Image (cartoon, rainbow, N blue to C red):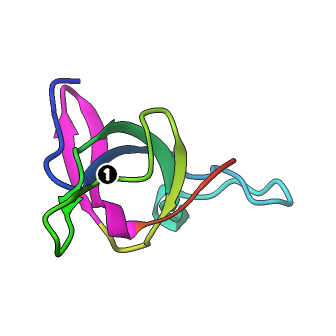
Amino acid sequence: MNLKPLGDRVIVKQDEAEETTASGLFLATEAKEKPQSGTVLAVGEGKLDKDGNLVPVPVKVGDKVVYGKFGGTEINVEGEDVLILRGDDLYAVFA
């Protein structure tokens, strides 16, 4: 991918929406809820704190993360839909 996030931003590839329910029922496209998890594709350098020190984003490429439901900006890069999020929009990293 030829896109580098600036500051404390992170580029995430969203996980695919579930196509069936737990009981095995198939969901229509409109009924599928967008997932709030994905894989980190790129990470910015970080942001400056009040003393001027660079604070890096606490994730790395390849991490699987959970993020806010309405956070970020969806864009299409090289035919692939990705999400650009601020580091503060990330809630957790899967261990």
Q: Is residue 16 visible?
A: no
Residue 29 is one of the magenta-drawn residues? no
Tell me if 61 is positioned left or right of 94 in this view.
Answer: left
Q: Quadrant of residue 28?
A: bottom right
Q: Position of residue 35 (x, y in %)?
A: 52, 59
Q: Position of residue 4 (x, y in %)?
A: 16, 35
Q: Quadrant of the N terminus?
A: top left
At which x and y percent is residue 39?
48, 41
Would you place residue 26 above or below residue 91 in this image?
A: above
Magenta span of residues: 72-89
Q: Main secondary structure of the magenta part?
A: strand
Q: Which residue is mark 1?
A: 56
Q: Is residue 95 visible?
A: yes
In this rendering, the answer to whether 78 lies above or below 19 is: above
Relative to 45, 64 lies left or right: right
Magenta highlight on residue 84? yes
Q: Residue at x 37, y 68 (%)?
A: 89
- At label 1, counting other C-alpha atoms closer than 10 Å, the crowd grade (few under 14, some 14-19, many 20 or more) is some
Q: Who's the residue at 35% across and 69% down the image?
A: 88
